[in-house]
Image (cartoon, grey):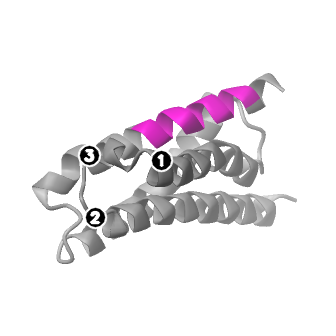
Protein backbone atom coordinates (compact mmCIF):
# COMPACT_ATOMS: atom_id res chain seq x y z
CA UNK A 1 0.00 0.00 0.00
CA UNK A 2 2.82 2.41 0.83
CA UNK A 3 4.38 1.82 -2.60
CA UNK A 4 1.04 2.58 -4.28
CA UNK A 5 0.81 5.89 -2.44
CA UNK A 6 4.40 6.69 -3.38
CA UNK A 7 3.67 5.92 -7.05
CA UNK A 8 0.64 8.19 -7.02
CA UNK A 9 2.72 10.95 -5.42
CA UNK A 10 5.41 10.48 -8.06
CA UNK A 11 2.66 10.69 -10.68
CA UNK A 12 1.59 14.07 -9.31
CA UNK A 13 5.19 15.29 -9.43
CA UNK A 14 5.60 14.02 -13.00
CA UNK A 15 2.34 15.72 -13.98
CA UNK A 16 3.54 19.05 -12.61
CA UNK A 17 6.94 18.65 -14.28
CA UNK A 18 5.27 17.94 -17.64
CA UNK A 19 2.94 20.92 -17.19
CA UNK A 20 5.95 23.13 -16.56
CA UNK A 21 7.66 21.74 -19.66
CA UNK A 22 4.63 22.89 -21.64
CA UNK A 23 4.59 26.25 -19.90
CA UNK A 24 8.25 27.03 -20.53
CA UNK A 25 8.97 25.10 -23.75
CA UNK A 26 5.92 26.17 -25.75
CA UNK A 27 7.10 29.81 -26.03
CA UNK A 28 10.39 28.44 -27.39
CA UNK A 29 8.51 26.75 -30.23
CA UNK A 30 8.83 23.16 -29.01
CA UNK A 31 5.17 22.49 -29.83
CA UNK A 32 5.09 24.13 -33.24
CA UNK A 33 3.96 21.83 -36.06
CA UNK A 34 7.58 21.57 -37.27
CA UNK A 35 9.16 20.77 -33.89
CA UNK A 36 6.41 18.64 -32.33
CA UNK A 37 7.40 15.40 -34.13
CA UNK A 38 10.87 15.67 -32.62
CA UNK A 39 9.45 16.28 -29.14
CA UNK A 40 7.13 13.30 -29.55
CA UNK A 41 9.99 11.06 -30.73
CA UNK A 42 12.26 12.11 -27.87
CA UNK A 43 9.42 11.49 -25.42
CA UNK A 44 8.88 7.98 -26.80
CA UNK A 45 12.59 7.26 -26.37
CA UNK A 46 12.63 8.59 -22.80
CA UNK A 47 9.44 6.83 -21.62
CA UNK A 48 11.08 3.44 -20.90
CA UNK A 49 13.82 5.18 -18.95
CA UNK A 50 11.22 6.96 -16.83
CA UNK A 51 9.40 3.69 -16.14
CA UNK A 52 12.64 1.92 -15.24
CA UNK A 53 13.74 4.77 -12.96
CA UNK A 54 10.42 5.00 -11.13
CA UNK A 55 10.21 1.21 -10.85
CA UNK A 56 13.69 1.01 -9.36
CA UNK A 57 13.17 4.06 -7.12
CA UNK A 58 10.02 2.55 -5.61
CA UNK A 59 11.40 -0.96 -5.20
CA UNK A 60 9.21 -2.60 -7.82
CA UNK A 61 9.24 -6.35 -8.28
CA UNK A 62 10.43 -7.98 -11.52
CA UNK A 63 7.67 -7.97 -14.10
CA UNK A 64 5.69 -5.18 -12.44
CA UNK A 65 6.58 -2.38 -14.83
CA UNK A 66 3.06 -1.95 -16.24
CA UNK A 67 1.66 -1.62 -12.72
CA UNK A 68 4.33 0.96 -11.94
CA UNK A 69 3.55 2.86 -15.14
CA UNK A 70 -0.20 2.77 -14.54
CA UNK A 71 -0.05 3.91 -10.93
CA UNK A 72 2.36 6.73 -11.75
CA UNK A 73 0.67 7.96 -14.94
CA UNK A 74 -3.00 7.75 -13.98
CA UNK A 75 -2.86 10.70 -11.54
CA UNK A 76 -1.08 12.73 -14.24
CA UNK A 77 -3.78 11.91 -16.77
CA UNK A 78 -6.56 12.82 -14.34
CA UNK A 79 -4.87 16.06 -13.28
CA UNK A 80 -4.31 17.07 -16.91
CA UNK A 81 -7.98 16.46 -17.64
CA UNK A 82 -9.06 18.64 -14.73
CA UNK A 83 -6.51 21.35 -15.49
CA UNK A 84 -7.49 21.49 -19.18
CA UNK A 85 -11.06 22.24 -18.13
CA UNK A 86 -10.70 24.38 -15.01
CA UNK A 87 -7.16 25.82 -15.06
CA UNK A 88 -5.89 25.90 -18.66
CA UNK A 89 -3.85 29.02 -17.84
CA UNK A 90 -1.54 26.75 -15.81
CA UNK A 91 0.03 25.68 -19.10
CA UNK A 92 0.59 29.26 -20.22
CA UNK A 93 -0.33 28.69 -23.87
CA UNK A 94 -3.28 30.06 -25.84
CA UNK A 95 -3.76 26.77 -27.75
CA UNK A 96 -3.39 23.47 -25.93
CA UNK A 97 -3.84 21.31 -29.04
CA UNK A 98 -0.24 20.14 -29.60
CA UNK A 99 0.92 20.45 -25.98
CA UNK A 100 -2.18 18.60 -24.80
CA UNK A 101 -1.62 15.91 -27.39
CA UNK A 102 1.98 15.59 -26.17
CA UNK A 103 0.82 15.15 -22.57
CA UNK A 104 -1.64 12.43 -23.57
CA UNK A 105 0.96 10.82 -25.81
CA UNK A 106 3.39 10.79 -22.88
CA UNK A 107 0.94 8.80 -20.77
CA UNK A 108 0.44 6.36 -23.63
CA UNK A 109 4.19 6.04 -24.17
CA UNK A 110 4.76 5.36 -20.47
CA UNK A 111 2.01 2.72 -20.37
CA UNK A 112 3.27 1.09 -23.57
CA UNK A 113 6.80 1.09 -22.14
CA UNK A 114 5.60 -0.59 -18.96
CA UNK A 115 3.86 -3.28 -20.99
CA UNK A 116 6.85 -3.78 -23.28
CA UNK A 117 9.23 -4.07 -20.33
CA UNK A 118 6.96 -6.68 -18.74
CA UNK A 119 6.75 -8.68 -21.96
CA UNK A 120 10.54 -8.66 -22.13
CA UNK A 121 10.76 -9.79 -18.50
CA UNK A 122 8.27 -12.63 -19.01
CA UNK A 123 10.11 -13.91 -22.10
CA UNK A 124 13.41 -14.06 -20.25
CA UNK A 125 11.92 -15.91 -17.27
CA UNK A 126 12.59 -19.68 -17.13
Vertical side of 29 occupied by 1: above or below: above
Q: Which residue is mark 2?
A: 95
Specify the label residue 23 is tagged with: 3
- Residue drawn at x 58%, y 38% as measured from the top left: 11
Tell whether 73 sits left or right of 39.
right
The nearer-to-camera label among 1 and 2 is 1
Q: Which residue is mark 1?
A: 86
CA neighbours of label 3 inside 10 A, class few (<14), some (14 to 19), many (20+)? some
Q: Earlier in the sequence, mark 2 or mark 3?
A: 3
The nearer-to-camera label among 2 and 3 is 2
The magenta stretch spans residue 64: no
Tell whether 109 sits left or right of 66.
left
The magenta stretch spans residue 7: yes
Write the start and end of the magenta stretch as one range.
Answer: 5-16
- Residue drawn at x 74%, y 58% as measured from the top left: 121
Q: Name the chief secondary structure element in magenta.
A: helix
Q: Earlier in the sequence, mark 1 or mark 2?
A: 1
Q: Residue placed farthest to the left in the image?
A: 28
Amino acid sequence: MARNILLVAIGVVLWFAAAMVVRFAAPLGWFSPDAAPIVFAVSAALAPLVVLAVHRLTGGQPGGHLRTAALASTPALLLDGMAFVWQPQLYGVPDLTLPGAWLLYGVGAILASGLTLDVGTSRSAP
